[in-house]
Image (spheres, rainbow, N blue to C red):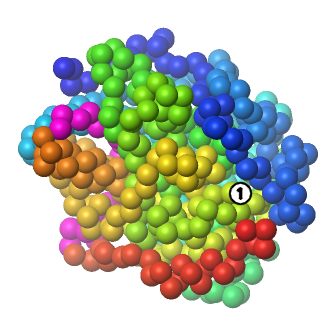
């Protein structure tokens, strides 16, 4: 069996897969934050271009990729599917472990897959600037890159703890011409309010989203862009899984287990949705699909499946999702990304329906898996991707016990070259093995909107 499966450039998928077409019942609609009624396209027009709104609400199984978007993506796509043979040997497992390597994009992660599409659709409608948030910095880097391709400006509100821990992510954004602001900031009313109430806050994605949405809503030339969670974001990422389907077909194989890490859900959706679609349609009903998240922000494993705001200030539509409460602020000692208080409604639905399952890991066991991967496969992966590595290792060890020769696929969503602060904390024993306390989760959930 081949070690590296590579598709030709002209084999890159030219359409995105929309899992909404295969759900047994329609997805619960987003609710207007003020009225509690289903949000309409007109409600979303102040911050999103119309084509993205259409994609958000579409139930069409496949949506064509614009030629200009495809031309940019194919400078680094299709990404390779690689067999981790040395990892298999180290684990003494009969399982076959494959990973989809998304670290070869200019921004070093899977995030440009949607950033480029979103920048394109905004530019088509005459938008000159995009405001967004970023946690660990991968999304902010990707959007800075994408807006540069289309001669647009970008303003990125970066969670303050990450801004301090990962200065080179900020530099990367600035090289591509973006403005990077630590959040909460004094630029917005929502940021100033948080700073007055909690002057020492490490920030959160919920706070940064409030700032970016407020920025977009108060400037006519500016729209808002989100790097995860929303349906159209998950849609754009399915180029990963569509490629993987073709790559496995080329070697006459198919994964028994598909794994992705989860913060908001874009990485997991990208690798798993095409396989989940085949599972739902009955073509491959036994495929096991695993979402791996941090114990420091355990939305899928400890959150409630209900309506909640996507941000702290309550400016965004309410989404039906697994949530820890929109006031949830993860600890600054949490080393990776994956810090969002909620999850993609589509990812949440798959977990709620039992199509996918969720697991949560502590920080040190995640970095232990990442170090094992680096020592066997050579690549130092992002802390976020390390959660998927850990899940893959666990499944492979299960196979060692049972003797099953399962095929495992995980999404290796990005490199860790700009995450050395976190690795240094781990190597020198300073990384706190943190699990968010249940009593604090219960307290955060008391702030859910009444419709929840």
Tag 1 secondary structure:
strand
Residue 195's place in the image compared with 390, above or below, is below
Percent x, y for residue 417? 34, 51
Residue 430's place in the image compared with 407, above or below, is below
Placement of the C terminus among the 4 image quadrants: bottom right
Residue 139's place in the image compared with 443, above or below, is above
Magenta stretch holds residue 421: yes
Percent x, y for residue 449? 75, 72
Q: Is residue 127 left or right of residue 436?
A: right
Please tell me which residue lies in front, 263 or 26: 26
Residue 340's place in the image compared with 66, above or below, is below
At x 32% / y 77%, what residue is drawn?
A: 432
Q: Using the rendered view, name the quadrant where residue 208 is placed.
A: bottom right
Magenta stretch holds residue 387: no
Please tell me which residue lies in front, 438 or 8: 438
Q: Is residue 365 left or right of residue 111?
A: left
Instruction: Please say whether residue 79 is visible from this viewpoint.
Output: yes
Instruction: Please say whether residue 228 is visible from this viewpoint.
Output: no
Q: How many labels sit on residues?
A: 1
Answer few, some or many: residues within 10 Å of disc 1's Cα (few below 14, many 20 plus, some between 14 and 19).
many
Mark 1 lies on residue: 319
At x 59% / y 49%, what residue is drawn?
A: 349
Q: Is residue 387 left or right of residue 154?
A: left
At x 49% / y 69%, what residue is drawn?
A: 302
Q: Which residues are magenta?
A: 404-428
Please tell me which residue lies in front, 249 or 168: 249
Placement of the N terminus among the 4 image quadrants: top left
Percent x, y for residue 333? 41, 75
């Amino acid at each position: 069996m081949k070690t590296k499966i590579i598709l030709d450039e002209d084999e890159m998928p030219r359409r995105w897969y929309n899992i909404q077409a295969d759900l047994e019942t329609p997805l619960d609609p987003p609710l207007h934050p003020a009225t509690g009624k289903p949000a309409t396209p007109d409600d979303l027009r102040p911050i999103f271009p119309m084509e993205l709104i259409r994609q958000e609400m579409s139930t069409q199984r496949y949506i064509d990729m614009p030629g200009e978007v495809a031309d940019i993506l194919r400078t680094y796509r299709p990404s390779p599917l690689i067999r981790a043979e040395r990892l298999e040997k180290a684990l003494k497992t009969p399982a076959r472990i494959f990973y989809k390597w998304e670290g070869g994009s200019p921004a070093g992660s899977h995030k440009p897959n949607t950033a480029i599409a979103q920048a394109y659709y905004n530019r088509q409608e005459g938008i000159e600037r995009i405001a967004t948030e970023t946690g660990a910095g991968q999304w902010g880097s990707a959007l800075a890159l994408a807006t540069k391709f289309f001669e647009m400006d970008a303003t990125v509100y970066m969670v303050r703890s990450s801004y301090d821990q990962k200065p080179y992510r900020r530099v990367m954004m600035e090289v591509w011409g973006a403005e990077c602001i630590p959040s909460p900031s004094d630029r917005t009313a929502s940021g100033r309010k948080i700073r007055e109430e909690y002057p020492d806050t490490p920030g959160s994605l919920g706070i940064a989203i409030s700032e970016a949405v407020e920025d977009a809503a108060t400037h006519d030339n500016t729209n808002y862009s989100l790097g995860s969670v929303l349906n159209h974001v998950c849609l754009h990422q399915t180029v990963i899984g569509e490629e993987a389907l073709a790559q496995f077909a080329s070697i006459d194989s198919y994964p028994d287990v598909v794994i992705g890490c989860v913060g908001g859900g874009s990485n997991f959706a990208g690798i798993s949705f095409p396989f989940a679609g085949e599972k739902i349609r009955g073509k491959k009903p036994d495929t096991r699909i695993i979402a791996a998240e941090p114990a420091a922000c355990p939305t899928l494993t400890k959150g409630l499946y209900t309506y909640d705001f996507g941000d702290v200030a309550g400016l965004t539509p309410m989404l039906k999702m697994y949530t820890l409460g929109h006031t949830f602020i993860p600890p600054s000692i949490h080393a990776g990304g994956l810090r969002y208080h909620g999850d993609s409604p589509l990812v949440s639905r798959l977990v709620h329906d039992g199509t996918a399952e969720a697991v949560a890991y502590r920080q040190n066991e995640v970095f232990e898996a990442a170090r094992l991967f680096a020592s066997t496969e050579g690549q130092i992966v992002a802390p976020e991707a390390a959660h998927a590595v850990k899940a893959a290792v666990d499944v492979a060890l299960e196979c060692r016990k049972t003797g099953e020769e399962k095929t495992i696929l995980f999404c290796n969503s990005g490199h860790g070259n700009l995450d050395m602060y976190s690795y240094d904390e781990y190597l020198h024993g300073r990384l706190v093995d943190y699990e968010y306390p249940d009593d604090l989760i219960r307290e955060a959930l008391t702030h859910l909107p009444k419709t929840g």
